[in-house]
Image (tube, rainbow, N blue to C red):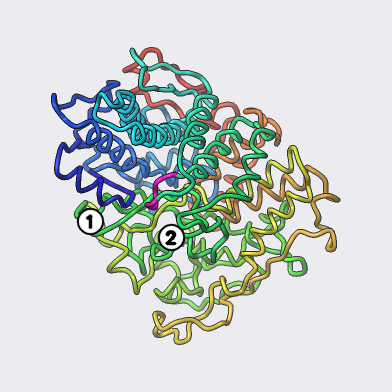
Amino acid sequence: MKTKFFAPLLVAILLGGFNCNKSAEKIGNFNLTIPLPAAINGRLLIDNFLLNSYGLLDGVYPNQPYSTWSTGTDNWIYGSVAGGEAHKGSVQTDQPEAANISTYTSQPGNSYFEAKWQANIMGIKYANNVLLQAAKGTSNGVSAIYAAEATAEARFLRGFFELEMAKLWRNVPYITETSTGALKNAGPIWLQIEGDFRYAKDNLPATQPEPGRPNKYAAEAFLVKTLLFDHKYTAAQPLLNDLVANGVTTGGVKYALVPYADNFNPSKQNNAEGVFTIQARVHDGSNGYDGNSGDVLNFPSAGPAQCCGFFGPSFSFVNAFKTNAITGLPFLDTYNNYDLHSDMGITASSPYTPTTDPIDPRLDWTAGRRGIPCLDWGIMGGDSWARAQSSNGPYFNMKTLYYKAAQATTSEAFGGWATNQSTSNCYNAIRFADVLLWAAEVEVEVGSLQKAENYVNQVRTRAANPAGWVHTYIDPSNPTGGFTTTPAANYKIGLYSAANGTGFVSGGRAYARKAVYFERELELGMEGHRFFDLQRWDGLYGGPAGAGYMAGILNAYMAHETAVPGFEPIYLGAKFTQNKNELYPIPQAEISAYLGLKQNTGY
């Protein structure tokens, strides 16, 4: 069993008594309760169910019958690949289920969807069993204080898994501890999810003793996220004001923006920017399952892990980081007019010079590019690193990596086959930059455009600090020997301002909205959010961007990628269909098992 937050006392109790093995669960059938031994301490039961639910936050459990990369909560396939930030990667024939998701041709029988559904249902079931046991109170040998704590955490966990399902499928069941009978669609369940997170916010403490356990502010942030899916901007505004002003982490330190790269460095996570961070750890006897095993495929062919070339940043995504040489701002409408110079089609043995175009410095913490330092692994060497340029492109994802100097402590083999591919690189489910950009989004819709600009500029100011940029090596032949103060590329990033004609107030609401949306992709790219952001902004689902917004963005994306010379035409003829592909198909196995479940439109 997996325990993803560090609670030594609970682990000691658990290992000394009843062990509920997640891999033994039959989750294709819906059973509300899990068979229990006749005589067992109620506190131990609650601990057990609670830890099992926590263990599923990353979507992965030991000996699961499906690939871990199809269930990981980072949603690299469902959120970033399908959101146009990345190609599926590897060769075209590898992982055809993922290829179908990337071209919006998936059908309900795609095994990835069943795997994802089941992992979340299992997390909900464990959370509900906590609630059942906690409700027995003192009659179950549990103190009222502990029952209240466990109830608040279980409500948070249930809300988390239900939100995860609602993001992908929207029309999903809402399953409580008292639910009986067959599963059926409940329609959009935002109200019920909001209820779980609101309860957790009102009953969780302001701080927690272990990383990975939600405090009241984490619950408040997830409540905001749900409200934004429900387009309740006015209701979200005071919650965001509270998060920005009063959020605290362990030790009473206010949430803050830390150096950008620290959010993806296993040795520097659980920092002041982490509003809710899903834990990952290695070398604990779990055969790699407690690490970030959802990302085991997402490494370059050389350098870190040396496998398997999946999840390569797209040309369109990299183009978004080009900046104006004068203002340092992105090209909101024309970023895709030409592709940033890359080594696409240039062999590693051929000469190559990286672009000197001005770029946002966050690019090189996000996309591995030839000629640029890759952490302390050396200069990115080109096609020998990126693998299969013709189907993946010339880039790889930097945010899954670990430092060479820390490889022994931050990575291990996964499942007996993936060398150094399970890592202690935690997943930032919500970080403070996310909160600031939500606040900007809300201010655009129901508040002050100037305040929205200020929030965006807070995020950009962090990125503009040269101390947080990628720098050249002191000695390129010894990349672990440290870095100079010389930037590795022509980094240029500026702030929105009335003084240079880019202010939100003078530009108006439509311009401000576009700038906020663009900033979310730059700041949070390759973190699994993009598809779901496009979905909730689309007017078809009540968003402010107009009906067909998502289809327009993603069809333009596929047209651009198809036209890149030398890139295999995986998107040739592909089409994002409006009023269908905004949601994923409900797994056919679930439709067949529960006649009350109805399929989403178009499938």
For the residue carrying disc 2, how many other residues have a C-alpha within 10 Å: few (<14), some (14-19), or many (20+)?
many
Q: Is residue 490 magenta?
A: no
Q: Position of residue 454 (x, y in %)?
A: 73, 55
Amino acid type at circle 1 is: Asp
Up the image or down, 560 lies above or below 225; here it is: below
Q: Is residue 25 left or right of residue 427?
A: left
Q: Is residue 371 visible?
A: yes
Residue bearing mark 1:
284
User: What residue is at 56 percent from the left and 35 percent from the top?
Assistant: 576
For the residue carrying disc 1, how many other residues have a C-alpha within 10 Å: few (<14), some (14-19), or many (20+)?
few
Q: Secondary structure at mark 1?
A: loop
Q: Nearer the viewer, residue 353 or 432?
A: 432
Of mark 2 and mark 1, the one earlier in the sequence is 2
Quadrant housing residue 268: bottom left
Quadrant housing residue 239: top right
Q: Which mark is residue 103?
A: none
Magenta span covers which residues? 209-214
Q: Main secondary structure of the magenta part?
A: loop
Q: Position of residue 338 (x, y in %)?
A: 66, 59
User: What residue is at 28 percent from the left and 38 percent from the top?
Assistant: 52
Q: Secondary structure at mark 2?
A: loop
Residue bearing mark 2:
269
Q: Position of residue 585 (x, y in %)?
A: 45, 27
Q: Nearer the viewer, residue 475 or 197?
A: 197
Q: Nearer the viewer, residue 496 or 447?
A: 447
User: What residue is at 69 percent from the left and 53 percent from the top?
Assistant: 455
Q: Nearer the viewer, residue 34 or 94?
A: 34
Q: Is residue 43 left or right of residue 135?
A: left
Amino acid type at circle 2 is: Gln
Q: Is residue 296 visible?
A: no
Quarter holding the N terminus?
top left
Up the image or down, 250 lies above or below 471; here it is: above
